[in-house]
Amino acid sequence: MRSILLLVLACAAGASVSPAAPATPKAAGHPPTITGTNVETYRKIGETELKLWIFNPATKSEKPLPCIVFFFGGGWSSGTPAQFEPQSRHLASRGMIAIVADYRVKSRQNALPADCVSDAKACVRWVRANASRLGIDPMRIAVGGGSAGGHLAAAVATVPGLDSATDDKTVSCLPNALILFNPGTVMAPFPGLELKGFGAGLDKARFGCEPTEISPIHHVKKGLPPTIIFHGKADTTVPYATVEKFTEVMKAAGNRCELIGYEGQPHGFFNKAKYPETLEATDGFLVSLGYLPKK
């Protein structure tokens, strides 16, 4: 269980959309260069400018469009916003505005996970506050991510604290939907979840806050956004049992939460062997919400 809490996760990144899994970019720089996007800064902290890359549909719409914001994986320590470029290009081609966002990490800004959550919340607030200018429907903002990025997406929806003092709390950071790929959802011991080694490395110094403060499962309540989770059953970094329990708790609270498990698949599988399947299921989930038209 220590592995989920440390989340030293492999970042499965991709560079282009195709029926096959996207190729992993070689030594991608930071910030990345992502062609065909509009780049904006959503937050400045000291000399650090946190940017996001916006993928717009080719055909302009007179009506506000649904949007999805993706957060990359990398154990809160590294990673690139380009990880979700393939999914973003696909969803933009389907008529949705897609965004990949940067946030502070350990290797670049000596950030702790609590800082990462603060950035993710600020990012979603920025998107909602600028929705009219960007052509986004503020009531149809989905948030997604993989691994540590999946944790951030889930935390934005569940964790009540860790906001920046400068955030405009009148603008909600609550997503309208969640799309999670092998996410970290359990950051502290939880009743009914028995996993060997649980509790190792759990402390305030590691997270930048108390472990329960940053643990999505500990803050599940009624009224959370509809959620879909993709997870490998052979994941040894974030055990499958953790998302099973999260799904159980979400449903018990009356929330829509779908878990799709993949036999024999390890961590980061979603941008590899099962990329076409997870992309198709993502598309179908968004169709079910009315965010995308039926194919």
Image (spheres, rainbow, N blue to C red):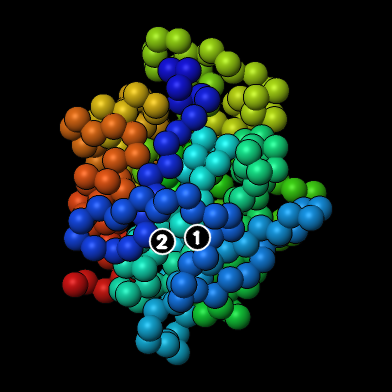
Disc 2 to disc 1, C-alpha distance: 7 Å
User: Considering depth in this image, is 216 or 235 the residue closer to the camera?
Assistant: 235
Q: Residue furthest top?
A: 196
Q: Residue furthest front?
A: 26
Q: Look at the image and tell me in which quarter the N terminus lies.
A: top left
Type of residue at label 1?
A: Val
**Which callout, 2 or 1, points at the residue further toward the start of the chain?**
2
Q: Which residue is mark 1?
A: 100
Number of dots carrying numbers: 2
Residue 107: percent from left, percent from top: 63, 38
Residue 179 in view in this figure: no
Task: Tell me: residue 165, above or below residue 37.
Answer: above
Residue at point 39%, 26% (across, down): 237
| Contact check, label 2 and label 1, Cβ < 8 Å | yes
Is residue 66 toward the left or the right of residue 32 in the image?
left
Type of residue at label 2?
A: Glu
In which image quadrant can residue 98 be found?
A: bottom left
Task: Tell me: residue 178, above or below residue 90.
Answer: above
Residue at point 45%, 62% (across, down): 68
Residue 106: percent from left, percent from top: 64, 37
Task: Tell me: residue 6, above or below residue 18.
Answer: above
Is residue 108 toward the left or the right of residue 138 in the image?
right
